[in-house]
Amino acid sequence: MSDRRVESLARVICEYSLRVEPGQLMLIEAPALAEPLVLEIVTRALEMGALPRVRVAAEGTQLAFLSEAAEEQLTTLLPGAMPEMAAIDLRVAIHAAWNTRELSGVDPARVAAVREARAPLMELYMRRSAAKELRWCVTAYPCEAFAQDANMSLAAYEDFVYRAGWLHLPDPVAAWRGFAEKLRAIADRLSGVRTLRVLAEDTDLTVGVAGRAWVPCNGERNFPDGEVFTGPIETETTGDVRFSFPAIFSGREVEDVRLRFEGGRVVQSEAAAGQELLRQMLAIDEGASILGEFAIGTNYGVQDFSKQILFDEKIGGTCHMAVGAGYPETGSTNRSGLHWDMVCDLRSGGEIHADGEPIYRDGRFLPEFAPDLSPPQG
């Protein structure tokens, strides 16, 4: 029996997140095990007049490439990649996996080489997105591997995923539209801030954001969603940050990450596990050790760390930062083949100060600064 929530997810992505229009070229990228969601998205996109094309990855193909490819194969950007990225109007990326640890034995240097080779593709992707020429959405399909990582049964994980997107509500689109208004109000308030200071356990970090745009994430680019983010001034990040949760990269966990910034750049990095991967990723290019994103998680329907960044960076009561490429629409000029999100929990004693004044404490915006963001009931 099909799950009506999968159909609902496809409808929300096509009708709300992407706002599909007749004649638009849509690229759908997914692992084969996400077939039920792929089929629903294709069906709804066709009903709306779009031209969907599907790229499905078979189990083990990424591991085979990273393990067996010669250096030239690793570092060659296929001739059709850039023209395709320049041509598509819509892109859907569906996250799912047979084995989230599949790449744990791959040499980090090989992963870094692929990232570096694909940097022009990422830059084009972000540039077209900023110019509103390309609309995109990243979502997830519940699977056994993700459920195991989250220490849940598959049924419990399905409930976690679909409730995080408010798909249990009679009209999830209306709920997201109402939430979008609240996020816009927060982004408007933050747009006048010059510096942010984050205080938490082993964390005292100051980030310059003067003149940078804040983007409210209301379910259009990620689904589920719930954050506000900006691109920090590249030379104005100073201090120390300790990330509360493991940083996940290609299925590998880097635990207890601590970074020290001076003049906008990481000058010291430590990790209790995965130190070599952290070091190599921060060194893949000039922009990899600079913050490309600073964000605050606002989805209080997501409270548990699941080892999937699509959900973890949205946890209400956290902030996250990405080393590497920034989004041009924020004003960021940082370019890199890397964009690696890391999450800091602020729910127990954490604070954020804006231009010296507290605006956020214990995982919540102060009521005088922002509206209540409690999830809709239903």
Image (cartoon, rainbow, N blue to C red):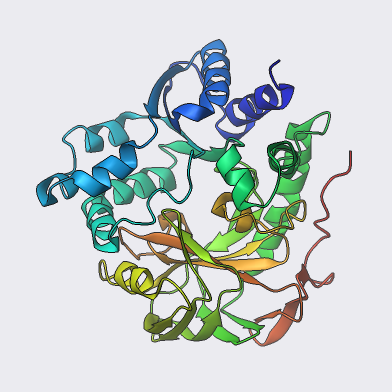
Q: Position of residue 315 (x, y in %)?
A: 68, 59
Above or below, 51 against 328 in this view is: above
> Quadrant of residue 282 in the image?
bottom left
Q: Residue furthest right?
A: 378
Q: At 52% across and 74% down in the image, what residue appears?
A: 209
Left or right: 138, with 377 as reference point = left
> Quadrant of residue 131 in the image?
top left
Q: Position of residue 60 (x, y in %)?
A: 36, 37
Q: Position of residue 156 (x, y in %)?
A: 75, 41
Q: Position of residue 106 (x, y in %)?
A: 31, 56
Q: At 44% across and 61% down in the image, what residue appears?
A: 340
The tally of labels here is 0
Left or right: 160, with 131 as reference point = right
Left or right: 120, with 3 as reference point = left
Q: At 74% across and 58% down in the image, what residue appears?
A: 303
Q: Quadrant of the N terminus?
A: top right
